Amino acid sequence: MQADLICIGNELLTGLIENSNAGFLARRLWSLGIEVRESVVVADDMETISNALQRAFARSEIIIFTGGLGPTDDDITREAVANTLGLKLVLDKNWLKKLEGFFNKRGLKMPENNRKQALLIEGATLIENQGGTAPGAIFERDGRLIVMLPGPPNELKPIFDRSVGPFLKEFNRGNLSRLKTLKCCGIGESTLEDKIKALGDWDLPPISYVAKGYEVHLQIKGKGNAVEAAAAIEKAENRLTELLGDYIYGSNDDTLAGKVAELLTNHNLSLSLAESCSGGLLSSMVTDIPGSSVFYKGAMIAYSGEVKIGNLGLRKELLEKEGQVSQAVAIAMAKAARALFHTDLAVGITGIAGPDGGSAQKPVGLVYIALANARECYCKKLNLGGGRRAVKERTAQMALDIIRREVLDSSTNKG
Amino acid sequence: MQADLICIGNELLTGLIENSNAGFLARRLWSLGIEVRESVVVADDMETISNALQRAFARSEIIIFTGGLGPTDDDITREAVANTLGLKLVLDKNWLKKLEGFFNKRGLKMPENNRKQALLIEGATLIENQGGTAPGAIFERDGRLIVMLPGPPNELKPIFDRSVGPFLKEFNRGNLSRLKTLKCCGIGESTLEDKIKALGDWDLPPISYVAKGYEVHLQIKGKGNAVEAAAAIEKAENRLTELLGDYIYGSNDDTLAGKVAELLTNHNLSLSLAESCSGGLLSSMVTDIPGSSVFYKGAMIAYSGEVKIGNLGLRKELLEKEGQVSQAVAIAMAKAARALFHTDLAVGITGIAGPDGGSAQKPVGLVYIALANARECYCKKLNLGGGRRAVKERTAQMALDIIRREVLDSSTNKG
């Protein structure tokens, strides 16, 4: 079963508002076994909306509209859909009463232009909106299911989860095409693909790849009925796990930071950081995880040489001899953080994020990441590209992977 | 002049990756006076890409593709565009050499499947990609300008800004419909709209509003020829600046963090931080700005009580009496950071990001932000909503605004 998304709104085409609804709906539909065939953003324009609907109507079983249900003159989704399909708009007296009540409660008279928000396509079911004045609507026409949702994400998301999702689940029962994502890090996209191709006799479901910074995600598509799809996915997952081992850190909604948090919590290990070029990004990623206070103590963001010396206690001679960006400094930072914050593990990061500060010997993108535990302190050297923000992001991701492998290895050694 | 965006990738249709390129390109094109007519996301599928291209070709002068230029089998944008337009793909020997060099430098042999990334549509100009292996391409065909860009945002964005933007600017000269965005912070969207409506006799260009977290952006649309548009925008900007004063922090591509960096640099003031609930996010936002090392010394991420006491030197009794989340602790943190890092200004942040840790008296979203300068230390109390990440983001934005106003006020007092 396939769906088309039609997102309506001039503000989306100017980029003033990020179209987060498309990604949200796509993820929700996938998890219901419904594939998004195409997702389009069009202007608040009668002809354009009509063309988009006709295209979608010709090929998808489900068509979801977002936006254009507001009270102002440029909100014309209702009229456009009704005109295109030759349907009438009828007044929903219950919603009109609700609207009037909504304004009365605030001591206001309902503006005349809000009245059109109570117009419903004939035969459609109104979907209540508890967060705004625009209700949704759902109806069938010539074997197509058409869903209309308000544009603001804080209205659309609860409406979908409360009403539309459960309906679609029922609608699509017995017609599932399932999906599983395996998430890898520490290996490049093409190396990964080569490894998988080298398996040769791959008679399993289709796999697609996507690189996300330092990570590669593998998406397995299990076709057929629910039982067949689940079996195919399981078989594929087993073979890939055997092949890729530790490169796979998790699946589906797992995040690398979340996995690291889980490992540290389960092994009762505490963590601290000393960051220079990553500037606090790693600390922020760690603290994005609810419950990170269980294992995370804190960090010294030692952005300047003075702080590395005065606050982390590194020797001035070391910095002068080795340079701020060096293996020796990364190691000294990790050791200093471990001592300062009294943690089991500590990471020290120094590098050149750019755009300035690079040299022939030490180019932009050169980064050292050191990890200190009770027994030792080791360091990894990286050469990263892609600009300042990308260098920071890849550094933070790589550091998370180093922590992950440290915990996995130490637990293996103990066992 | 109008453009169509065609974003290619199964991972966008499953919602695995948020399509941030569409918004980025839309904003950039707007600022160049080019209107996006339609923006579509399609699968890595020959027929679908071909259909999308034919539709776009029939109505827009500019067609921009993103994605599908990688080395793996499902990356088929080059082939699809060439087939649809009846063009050949030719090997670009220079890029092939670069690719081989790229792998050699890392001590690797180039995988065979990367070779196709050196294939270029005949007659197209190759656009260098300094952040990855997939180059872009630009060519004209039957009066249409076609641009192909790699999908990863950290590759696409610099390529656009360095090569495609300047080219399009030239291409579109003399055909402008201009746009200016004024960026405000510290004032809500509806308060702002009320203020502007109260001007009454507004005979200037249309304005649209959009709230982005703690900021509100005002978009002024100047129509007509280039001279008329520029004059209308200037007149509107003057009236709005007079009305809104310090609420406006900048315009167009300015960011709040960038403005703060500019102010601190120009006033020769140094900054340090002590962050608890924001967990390093503010530090990371500050260090995202190239050249921030001029004014930024570092931070103590004091996530645990032990670090607040042991490393920032707060009194244990203070924490016990006032609680970790309190005005007194925020003030003590700011003062401690200022002393520890020897900076002119320091900010201390403590709060409850959630989802746990709240109480009736101190709910999730309660945040204190203190700023210490040479003369005094003051504190702002916030009650924020929207979940853990939103609390962190709004806290960091609010802290930046507090620093901005501190520098503006102190320079006014001096003057």
Image (spheres, coloured by chain):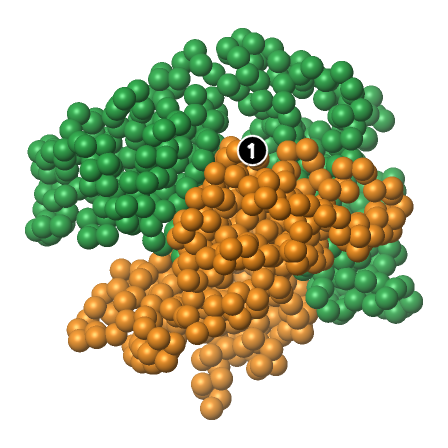
Chain colours: A green, B orange
Residue A344 vs residue B48, the one in the foreground: B48
Question: Which residue occupies 68% across, 57% down?
Answer: B126
Question: Which residue occupies 47% across, 72% down?
Answer: B173
Q: Quadrant of residue B17?
A: top right
Amino acid, disc 1 = Asp
Residue A81 percent coordinates (x, y): 24, 37
The correct choice, above or below, for A228 with respect to A70 in the image is above
The residue that mark 1 highlights is B45
Question: Which residue occupies 42% across, 49% down?
Answer: B58
Question: Which residue occupies 62% across, 13% down?
Answer: A232
* Crowd around label 1: few <14 · some 14–19 · many ≥20 (10 Å): some
Residue A53 percent coordinates (x, y): 32, 36
The correct choice, above or below, for B261 with respect to A140 in the image is below
Mark 1 belongs to chain: B
| Residue found at the very far top of the displayed protein | A227
Q: Quadrant of residue A343?
A: top right
B413 with respect to B309 (left or right): left
A216 with respect to A191 (left or right): left
